[in-house]
Amino acid sequence: MNFLKYWCVSAPSTTQTLTKQTTMEALIEMLGNATFENYVGAAEGYTEMAYQMSAHVLTLGYAIMLAALLYFILTIKTVAPKYRTSSVLSVVVMVSAFLLLYVQSQNWTSAMVYDADTARYVLGSGNDLFNNGYRYLNWLIDVPMLLFQILFVVTLTKSDFSSIRNQFWFSGTGMILTGYVGQYYEVTSPTLFFVWGFISTLFFIHILILMKRVINEGKEGAPAKAQKYLGAIWTLFFFSWMLYPGAYLMPYLFSLSADPALTETAVVARHITYTIADVASKVIYGIFLTLAAQEMSKAEGYDYEKMESAL
Ligand code: RET
């Protein structure tokens, strides 16, 4: 059932003269701190194309995690034993991402129901509302893992391993927890949304600085081909991680004003952005680390291409 329609029918006659402002107030009263995907579902609903594209891109996300899980298991022996922890961490990331993205996808299809009267998918009643929180909890596991992972491939020349690891963990979890709180306010309180987002960004900047240092140190003394991969990892890391704050801001990127854009285009854009970011930051990043580790292994005399038992 379309919530707004329901509200309009059961509310007093003033609803006939609903202005944009009062519509918004009515929605906020119904949905509170729900994310903007629910507001779009309650106000206008989704066209077939917007609903299905979202469902498909969410499904693609977890399917890729399962496929990539096999890659990381099957290539583990192509790198020397000391680099294998990196592959093990990719396996952990794939399993957790697969499960949580699966739940995220189910959350979308159960929150929105088809309404034959309007030929739209609208926010259903009786089910959980849609929330991106599963993603954030997934990051809580995956972000520290992804950050630790590179420490098992590169050799730090100046920095201390455990100090970097602890700082990665501290800022990684700080960034996610503050962002998690902020996302609840994306419709109800833009101020709180931006304040929490800003605090989260401070942690993020710290992570970027640390990662740049780790990669620069890692390049020193690495074989030429591995250096190339490490350079590519920095570019990939930077752009793929930037997509997450982009997805957080999506309702405002589409409105470019102080009020969030409650449009299905912004919703679909957020789903697509998250999926691209997830594939790049978890899967492609893991593959590049495997390739870099293969080059380092070869330089140390462990050449999987010459070994029958590696594959
Ligand atoms: C938030 C809140 C708004 C500000 C910033 C954010 C950054 C999020 C990032 C998430 C990365 C997640 C990854 C997950 C992989 O599994 C929390 C959206 C800066 C960078 C890499």
Image (cartoon, grey):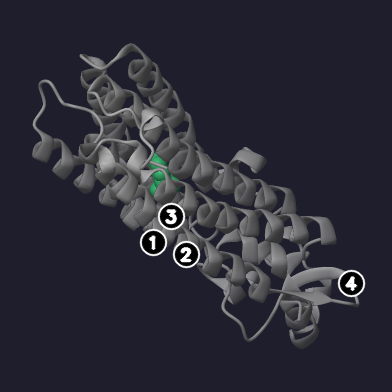
Q: Earlier in the sequence, mark 3 or mark 1?
A: 3
Q: Earlier in the sequence, mark 1 or mark 2?
A: 2
Marks 1 and 2 close (CB-CB < 8 Å):
yes
User: Pointer 4: residues within 10 angstroms few (<14), some, or many (20+)?
Assistant: few
Q: Residue at x 58, y 71 (%)?
A: 107
User: Pointer 1: residues within 10 angstroms few (<14), some, or many (20+)?
Assistant: some
Q: Residue at x 38, y 53 (%)?
A: 91
Secondary structure category for the residue under label 1 = helix
Residue 6 picture location, percent across and down: 76, 82
Residue 53 picture location, percent across and down: 74, 54
Q: Which mark is residue 94?
A: 3
Q: Amino acid at mark 3?
A: Met
Which numbered mark, 1 or 4, is in the foreground of this view? 1
Q: How many angstroms separate mark 2 from mark 4 (CA)? A: 32 Å
Q: How many angstroms separate mark 3 from mark 1 (CA)? A: 14 Å
Q: Earlier in the sequence, mark 1 or mark 4?
A: 4
Q: How many angstroms separate mark 1 from mark 2 (CA)? A: 8 Å
Q: Residue at x 80, y 75 (%)?
A: 114
Which numbered mark, 3 or 2, is in the foreground of this view? 3
Q: Amino acid at mark 2?
A: Leu
Secondary structure category for the residue under label 2 = helix
Say above or below: 136 vs 207.
below
Marks 3 and 2 close (CB-CB < 8 Å):
no
Q: Amino acid at mark 4?
A: Thr
| Pointer 2 residue | 100
Which numbered mark, 4 or 3, is in the foreground of this view? 3
Q: Which mark is residue 118?
A: 4
Which sits in the foreground, 231 or 251?
A: 231
| Pointer 1 residue | 137
- Seen from this angle, which residue lies furthest top? 224
Secondary structure category for the residue under label 4 = loop
